[in-house]
Amino acid sequence: MSHKPRIAETPSVRLIDLKSKSNSYFIVASVEVGNTTTKCILTATDLEKGTTYHVVKTVRMTRDVRQPKPGEEIFGKTLTGVELSSESVAELVRNTLLEAVKKANLDIKKDIHFVVRSTGVVAGFDAPEEVGEFIKALADGCLIAGVPPRNMTPPMSQDNINPRFQKFSKLNKVIFDGAVASVLPPTGATGVEIVANEMEGELATAGIKEGAQWVDVDFRNPCLSMDFGTTLDGRIISPEEPYAKTIGNFCGYAGAIPDAIIRGTQLVDLELGTALDVFDQKPPGMITMFLKGKKIKEYANRLMEKISIEKVPENVTRYGSVPVNPAAAAEIGVVLIGCDVGTNGSRMDELTELGAQIYKEEGLKVLFAVIDEVMAGVIYRLVEVAQKEGVVFPETSIGITGRAAISGDKPKLVLEKLETLGLGDKIEEKIVFVDDGLARGAAVMARCMNSLGTPHNPLGGHTGGKCILKDRIKLQSQ
């Protein structure tokens, strides 16, 4: 049976509405330095309704970051080997942020109410904890762009909140205690002790919670989120109330898989090229799929044979290039599920070789159809492993974001494949595909830090349940 995927796309807001003195828009800048792209996305949340709108997006290729200068310490590199220093990252962040603010015709000091920064560049680090240095470089970039420090940290009291938004804040009733959209991180303040890109997983989960509201999917706890940027991140969330726990994390390769396949076409740079460079929004026609369907599945199966998806073994420190600590995860009951190609990408060249063969024999349209089939297969296997590990509950909703999972025919194929796992009736009501999960998540995190919740339209709590504000007040009073 064919299901129609529910794909959330953020509607835009007009500049005239943002500039209106009577508006209740809380404007957040999400600054994200990824392995492939560096983005600044501005969103505006209407605090009366609790709905988030798109303002503007600027995207730069991370590979275009300036080279570290003599005397600058190289503290990491992207998945494709682009070297980074604190100073070069800070400049990249500053330029991307200022470009977005200028494009939106806004003032960085007066009009941007909060800035949240994140990174997916974790492959070049030796241990999960080293991500902290990168986050500091992101903060430096925001500061030199002119962001006031108070717009990047939780306020100490309601008096420290912008007077315009004080009436919306619940900070005099509940403080920010680390839970974002009613989910606690795996351990400590960040969870990076377990997996280096845990913060991205946190933001993606929160962003999918917000995006799901636009397409009538109740993506509250328990839920499972996956973010398919160049690397994979995401969380599996328990059903507890008022705060649910993070009981699983995803890590490894995601968009790096189609990137490796597409390099076989030689239409992109053999080292730095990505599927984004040649992606055509038009999927193959019905006739192509009818004539080539069997061939597409055969090629996809051959590619899938080179991809490992499993519970991360306890004896590794890196999985799918991402620094991990499976022993620490096991100790606190968190399941780590990873996606690798060989061992830390050792079989990526084989994907490129097969990509070259498919392109030569069938052309680019069929190659993209194969990529759709492969990525849908990856999602299916990730959920299947989570199910076998006992962390998928009858009421669990599934949320998917990221360039390598929501483009082309992937959402339709994902629904078809996941239906075979017996996740319940009306599967399209339990699975949501969301654009810009990280940027939406930044808007949610900023609201949580400032206690700007909307009890009549809650993001936290249990699927089908009510707002948990009273429960939180009771918990914190103890």
Image: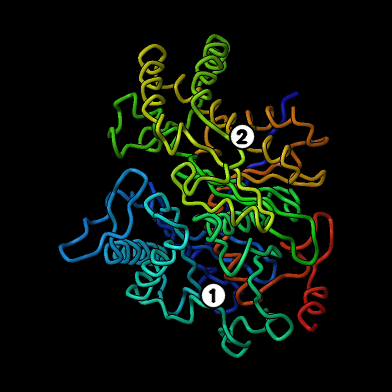
Residue at 70 percent of width and 41 percent of height: 431
Q: Is residue 84 above or below residue 351?
A: below
Residue at 56 percent of width and 88 percent of height: 160
Q: Nearer the viewer, residue 385 or 91?
A: 385
Q: CA distance from mark 1 to mark 2?
A: 38 Å
- The 10 Å Cα crowd at callout 2, few under 14, some 14 to 19, many 20 or more, is many
**Quadrant of residue 94 in the image?**
bottom left
Residue 127 point in image, percent of width and height: 44, 57
Residue 259 point in image, percent of width and height: 40, 34
Q: Is residue 162 above or below residue 378?
A: below
The residue type indicated by label 2 comes to Pro
- SS for dot 2: helix
- SS for dot 1: loop
- Position of the N terminus, as image quadrant, is top right
Number of the front mark, 1 or 2: 2
Q: Nearer the viewer, residue 407 or 373?
A: 373
Q: Earlier in the sequence, mark 1 or mark 2?
A: 1
Report the disc number at residue 142: none
Q: Nearer the viewer, residue 105 or 171?
A: 171
Report the disc number at residue 411: 2
Residue 164 point in image, percent of width and height: 59, 83
Residue most extreme to the left = 70
The residue type indicated by label 1 comes to Ser
In the rendered structure, are the residues bearing label 1 and label 2 in contact, judged by CB atoms less than 8 Å apart?
no
**Quadrant of residue 95 in the image?**
bottom left
Residue at 42 percent of width and 59 percent of height: 40
**Quadrant of residue 471 in the image?**
bottom right
Q: Which residue is mark 1?
A: 20
